[in-house]
Amino acid sequence: MSNKYTSIKVGVISLLSIFLLYYGINFLKGVNVMSNARVLHSYYNEIAGLTEGNSVTIKGYKIGTITNISFDNERNNELRVEMNIEDDIQIPLNTVAKIVSFDLMGTKGISFVLGDTSALVVSGDELIGDIEISLQDEVNAQILPLKNKTEELIGSIDSVMTVITTVLNKDARESLSKSLISLDETFTTLSETMIIVNKMVQENQENINSMMTNFSSITENLNSSNSEIKNILTNFSSFSDSLAKADILSTLNKIDAITYKINNGNGSLGKLVNDKELYENLKSASKELDELITDMKLHPERYVSFSIISPQNKPYVEPKID
């Protein structure tokens, strides 16, 4: 009898121990096994350090805990997060379960962003999953531009140091010194040139003023003669139009025909040009006629005589041709 009682006692103690162990584990996870809780779930591509037992809140008020996190092979290995939610909380079906950081230490949890639909979730429903940008990500986003500018500044400083190192080189210093001396000489020459030019301008100021006055006078004359210039241009335009309308080609053809006849000895002018004997006879006759006229001018009494007062005719003497 005592053995049977002992066995029952051991069994009861074992069951009680198992229950207490189960209750204790769930209690440590934040799960109240004695309450009627709804089991909801969401899917995430990554959970940013979320673990089982983390809290589920609405506006900072805890309404449940995360009970299980697992890979779902049927959804491209997305992470399935299951949550136990108090049954007396009304949650719209389009509520978003967002993973957030509860403190600066990075403690993760899920905060419900309540939807606006009238349909409410029941146990087994899926909520839309989302994840908040972490503080580290925000800091990285702010620091990244500063990091890039710092790298650019370091590169610029390196370039400046390279230039300084090059300038401090002995050969470079000598070259720079020679360049500065040459530049100084150039400025000196330019200054002397400006002095000379200024002196020339001062010495020829009257001539320059006179030139400007003459130029102004010419300009005024051109302005006053504007109408005359316009008439000249108009006449020139009319002359150009007349030339354009004239049958110049026909005239040139006629001149060419006349030249051809002259070259071939046709006509009097052609014979005169091409017949050498005729040309010599005409030349001789012209010479004799010239001599006759010269003699008539020198001795008119030989050709015109007045018997009343003139003496006897003098014999003809051939004039001397100088």
Image: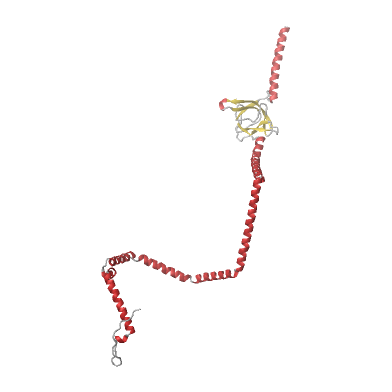
User: Quadrant of residue 307 in the image?
Assistant: bottom left
User: Quadrant of residue 212 in the image?
Assistant: bottom right
Q: Along the horizontal axis of the image, is 127 left or right of 28?
A: left
Residue occupying the point 63% across, 54% down: 183
Give the image location of residue 321, x and y in percent. 34, 79
Nearest the viewer among 257 and 311 is 311
Residue occupying the far right of the picture = 2
- Quarter of the figure that contains the N terminus: top right
The number of callouts visible is: 0
Residue occupying the far top of the picture = 1
Nearest the viewer among 10 and 238 is 238
Residue occupying the point 48% across, 70% down: 226
Scheme by which the image is coloured:
secondary structure
Residue occupying the point 66% across, 35% down: 136
User: Quadrant of residue 157 in the image?
Assistant: top right
Task: Decide: is 209 above or below 147.
Answer: below
Residue occupying the far bottom of the picture = 308
Residue occupying the point 73% across, 7% down: 2
Residue occupying the far left of the picture = 266
Q: Along the horizontal axis of the image, is 121 left or right of 283?
A: right
Give the image location of residue 243, x and y in percent. 37, 66
Nearest the viewer among 130 and 258 is 258
- Quarter of the figure that contains the C terminus: bottom left
Nearest the viewer among 316 and 257 is 316
Give the image location of residue 246, x and y in percent. 34, 66
Task: Decide: is 176 above or below 270.
Answer: above
